[in-house]
Every structure is written in C-alpha cells, then in structure tokens.
Amino acid sequence: MSINYKSQLGYGIYTIPDISVLLGYPRYKVARYLKNYLDEKLMISKYKDSYSWSLDGKKKAVNFLTLIELYTFFILRDGGLSTHKIANARKEISDTLKSPYPFANSKVLHDGNSIYYYFKDLMIQVGTKQLPLEKVIESFAEKIDFSGDDLASKYWPKGKSSSVVVDPKHQFGQPVINGTNINIEVINSMHESGEPESVIRSLYDLTNKEFNDVIKFYKTAA
C-alpha cells in the first residue's frame, strides 16, 4: 500500500506554529513530540513517507491527518498513558486496521487508562485482544468529524458549537468560518488593525456569532 498526500491539494499543510495554535500546546512541546515521538517511535512504518516533510530543510510540516493524530496523542499523554504504551497501541491498531493513520480513525477510542478500537464489529482493548467491560468514552467526539472511510475530515479547535473549523479542503487547511471559504486570519487582522466590526461583518456577510467566534479563537490562542 502506498500513500502520498504531501503532493496533493486538499490534505492541508501545518507547520509547528500552526499546530501549536490549533491544538493549544506550546511550540516547544509540539516540536519535541514531532522530533522525538512521531519521527522515531510512532511513525516509523511503511507509511512513513506520507505524513510529514520539510519546507526548507528546517521547518517541519504535517498534513491534516497527522494533525489529528497529534491531537489524539496529546490527549493520551495528558491522560497519563506512557509514550511506550501509545506507540505499541498505534502499531497494533495500524497493523489490524491496515491504516497509516490509526489515531485519526473513528474506530479508535480511549477511557483515560486504556486504548480500544473497533474491528469486525468487536471492540478490542489494545494489548489484550479481549472485549473490554469498561465504559468507553469517545475521546474526540466533540471536535472531529469523520468521513465515510472512518478517517477524520474536519477539526473543530474550539468545539462544534464554534463557527471556526479546520477543513483540509478549504484554504489549504487553515481555519475558516464553517460553510464558507473565509480564512479567519483575514477577519482577525482587520479587527486588530482597527476596522469597525460592522464594516467587517458587512464586507464578509458574517453573523454576530461568527465574528465573535473568530475573535475568541485568537484571544484563547494567544
């Protein structure tokens, strides 16, 4: 199986600063995870050529599905799971589901202590191959939409109640206002330069909520 997303439009492109803003983690931590964990432990497989690349020999960039994998990885680490356990889980799920992006798959779940995945209508606990009895929580149901192939298709950095969405098919995957192709960075830049809210809303046909969601996104990111 050979997959190469990096040369195609519609898969997004995210540098370390982008990832930091979208996932809400400091740049140093994102850079460290990319270098030490993804490169050396989690992504070494027959799919390794498809997930990231250098823009100028120094700056690392990843595609949308790797962005979602990082999101899942951060959640698992924050939940107390070790890097070793996460790496083993990722390999097992990738091998079973034949997926280069197992942590961006709707079939993967976790309850804070263990990792699970669906396979042939069974819910399997990683490392046991047994049906778990614990109540399983879908870790990213509030922030991720999935497509028909079970892979992540959209990411809602502030949750689905917000108008801000990351869709790799729009604006090279940079955040936009849901249902439009409006790059929210433009809205925020105009606001910071002193342009009246009424003018910005009229120019881009924005609702009050859409405008406020954009401003809130950048305030919390800062």
Image (cartoon, grey):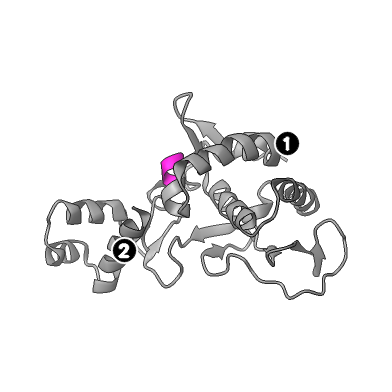
Q: Nearer the viewer, residue 114 or 124?
A: 114
In the image: residue 137, left or right of residue 193 = right
Instruction: Identify which amino acid the numbered label 2 is placed on.
Output: Lys
- Rendered location of residue 182, percent (x, y): 30, 57
Tags 2 and 1 touching, CB below 8 Å: no
**Left or right, residue 212 beside residue 4:** left
Residue picked out by circle 1: 46
Residue furthest out toward the front: 80
Main secondary structure along the magenta-highlighted residues: helix
Mark 2 sits on what residue? Answer: 216
Q: In the rendering, at what x and y percent does residue 58 appear? A: 47, 26
Give the residue at x 65% y 63%.
106
Tell me, yes or no, whether the highlighted magenta stretch contains residue 16.
yes
Q: CA distance from mark 2 to mark 1?
A: 41 Å
Task: Give the extent of the magenta segment.
Answer: 14-18
Q: Is residue 178 visible?
A: no
Q: Residue furthest top?
A: 57
What residue do we see at 15% from left, 51% from top? 193
Mark 2 lies on a secondary structure that is helix
Q: Is residue 42 magenta?
A: no
- Residue at position x 73%, y 76% from top? 135
Residue 9 visible, this orientation? yes
Q: Nearer the viewer, residue 36 or 96?
A: 36
